[in-house]
Amino acid sequence: MKNLTFLTLFFLLPLFLIAQKNSSSQEVYLIENVDIITMNKDNQVIKNGNIIIKNNKILSINGSKPEHAIVINGQGKYLIPGLIDMHVHNLADGPYMGYPTQGAGVLFDTQRFMTLYIANGVTTVFELSARAEHIGQRNEILKGQVIGPRIALAGLIDKSNAILTAQNPQEATFAVKLAKAQGFEFIKTYSQLDKPTFKAMVKEAKNQNMKVVGHIPTAFEDSQANEFFIDHFGLIAHAEELSKHAKQFNYQTAEQYAKLAKANNTWLIPNLSNLVNIAKQARSVDSVTSLESFSYVHPLMQSKWVVANQYNQGTNQKRIAYFDQMVEFHKLIVKAFKEQGVSMLAGTDAGTSGIVWGYSLHDELKLLVEAGLTEQEALSAATIQAAKWLTIQDKIGSIEQGKLADLILLDKNPLDNIENTKTISGVFVNGRWIDKHEINQMIQEVKK
């Protein structure tokens, strides 16, 4: 019994220390006279509301005001849920190619990197090529050592050139089990997998109660579309996966995909910003260096994006024309998927050339609206709908009593113009309030 008591205390102590470390989230906050865009099931907007935040949670909306609270004036402002980027690739320490004990060849400052998300109101991200280092980053955030977003992790499995590999169905089954054992919550399929391996991987993920996101393997290029819309393949990582299998870039093809996706309950991350930026880079890398956010990118990534830009090297007019066709086809895909009632989520592929973490999500929302979504639908794709796919809609994604306090205070209404998501006055992340002044200080530190 003594041993059992000791073990209990041993495992509970870290949780207690984490709670103590996050003491800033213990403060009581009151946001007064703010228009609350709840993103709840009724899409309710509460005019001139008051919201109380305590212990990292929304304590009440229009409840009794506490006697002692840090008051935030919300007059003329708008409160929305924290944004969710459903397709990111975060910088993390590595690679490991030296002698034993040498460690990673490059060490990144986690706080400087995560600041890019916080400065843009991105309070949750979905890492689609997760490594052990990303678990470490998440732990830093949970311990209160780093101010950063919540991180969901998908283990990527491919035929080769990946941390987790599978060349046949038996290896696929093992790889999925290994991904779960390593602490990843989701599985990402990738491009080189053959058909039997892909199908076995998705089947085993279902057995392991792990949702599947990913690429449609190139092995399906000469197949009918219904072959890759298989049971439990729940989320397509970007519209490019559909366009690369399309025989024709027209609405009829987009509609066919949409109907199959609807029948299979497969959701889509359109990721419009990816191909838009690729098409620009095929013309000139100046489109990268001219980005306002480029100065916040780590120097190693700046160099890679410019000097070794895969989209610009060997470019020609034929390639540029092909990319332009894909850009237009992806708009048709969004239109068709909307008309068929297929759920779409906002994701950016942040980390690929020219797609800057945090900043790119606002660009993606603008492109989704230009492609035919309403402001409400685009915002939903980056909040409650994303939370639903991640199965954490009871915790984040909308502004409701009892949910976690991941919130953005805006100067202008995003339902009038989706670009108003950029007018950030302050952010609540993990129950901690960071006002515009502190955000500016944090982002200037990154620039150094």
Image: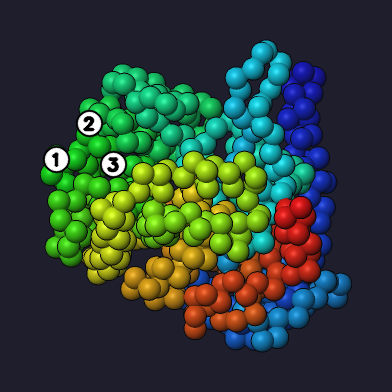
Residue appearing at x 60%, y 56% in the figure: 294
**Which amino acid type corresponds to the residue marked 3 in the rendered image?**
Ile
As drawn, is 416 to the left or to the right of 300?
Answer: left
Residue that protrudes farthest toward the right in the picture:
68
Classify 10 Å Cα crowding around label 1: few (below 14), some (14-19), many (20 and above).
few
Q: Nearer the viewer, residue 186 or 323?
A: 323
What is the number of the mark on residue 216?
A: 3
135 with respect to 101 (left or right) = left
Looking at the image, tell me whether mark 1 or mark 3 is earlier in sequence order: 3
> Which residue is denoted by mark 1 in the rendering?
223
For the point 18% across and 65% down, the residue is 251
Separation (CA) of disc 1 from disc 3: 11 Å
Task: Determine the image quadrant of residue 427.
Answer: bottom right
Q: Position of residue 387 (x, y in %)?
A: 49, 56
Indicate the amino acid at tag 2: Lys
Report if the CB atoms under discs 1 and 2 are less than 8 Å apart: yes
Residue behind mark 2: 195
Mark before the other along the chain sequence, 1 or 2:
2
How far is disc 3 from disc 2 in space, using C-alphas? 10 Å
